[in-house]
Image (tube, rainbow, N blue to C red):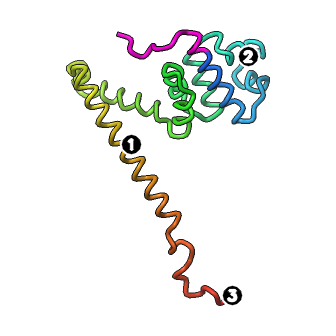
Amino acid sequence: MDVLQDQDAAARRATLRAILKLFRKRSGLKSAEMAKLMGKGLRTYQRWESGYYGVQVEPIRRFAEIVHVDPWGIIFAVEFGSVDFAVDTAGNNGASLLLVALRRLHRRPGGKALRELDPRSLMLTYTRGFDLLIQRAEEYAADLEQWMFDENLGGGDDPDDGKR
């Protein structure tokens, strides 16, 4: 059951190309510089960045390390067909942390928890977890907005105000 493959290989290559180029340019690197940092020849790097070779985990990990983004965010984004997903996880390692959580579940004593769960239970649990993350993001945004407009942060209560 492969529910993720809703796009063809050409679309995945195009998404990969867009992501790699975006992050390389954001880092201020030219193709030749990135090729050198990755230990590849320029032409090989250009072919790789074009998506010619498809998703290759180790080169993506190296690339992500150089440009300081989430490697699994790139890989998932290619499968989702969403450059935005790679951008959204670039700074917080959201996709990599998801894999860490799955690994922890897998490594629990006994190691059978994941095996013993049915697909419906997994989907419900994952959905609840993501709903909690959405709620936390909304709370965080509200907290940040309140903090930005808090009059007390501007020094309004400073007794030395106006004495300079």
Q: Amino acid at mark 3?
A: Arg
Q: Secondary structure at mark 2?
A: helix
Are discs 1 and 2 less than 8 Å apart at CB? no
* Position in image of residue 98 (x %, y %): 40, 31
Q: CA distance from mark 1 to mark 2?
A: 38 Å
Q: Secondary structure at mark 3?
A: loop
Residue placed under numbered mark 1 in the picture: 134
- Taking the image as shown, residue 42 lies to the left or right of residue 22, namely right
Residue 4 located within the stretch drawn in magenta: yes
Residue placed under numbered mark 2 in the picture: 46
**Quadrant in the rendering for residue 67:** top right
Q: Is 63 situated above or below 164?
A: above
* Position in image of residue 125 (x %, y %): 26, 31
Q: CA distance from mark 3 to mark 1?
A: 46 Å
Depth check, mark 1 against mark 2: the one in front is 1
Depth check, mark 3 against mark 1: the one in front is 1
Q: Amino acid at mark 2?
A: Gln
Looking at the rendered image, the quarter that the C terminus falls into is bottom right
Q: Is 96 situated above or below 156?
A: above
Residue placed under numbered mark 3 in the picture: 164
Q: Identify the magenta region.
A: 1-13
Q: Main secondary structure of the magenta part?
A: loop
Q: Residue drawn 73% across and 12% down? A: 44
Q: Residue drawn 53% across and 63% down? A: 148
* Position in image of residue 119 (x %, y %): 25, 20
Looking at the rendered image, the quarter that the N terminus falls into is top left
Sequence-earlier tag: 3 or 1: 1
Q: Is 136 situated above or below 75?
A: below
Q: Residues within 10 Å of mark 2 (few under 14, many from 20)?
A: some
* Position in image of residue 23 (x %, y %): 66, 31
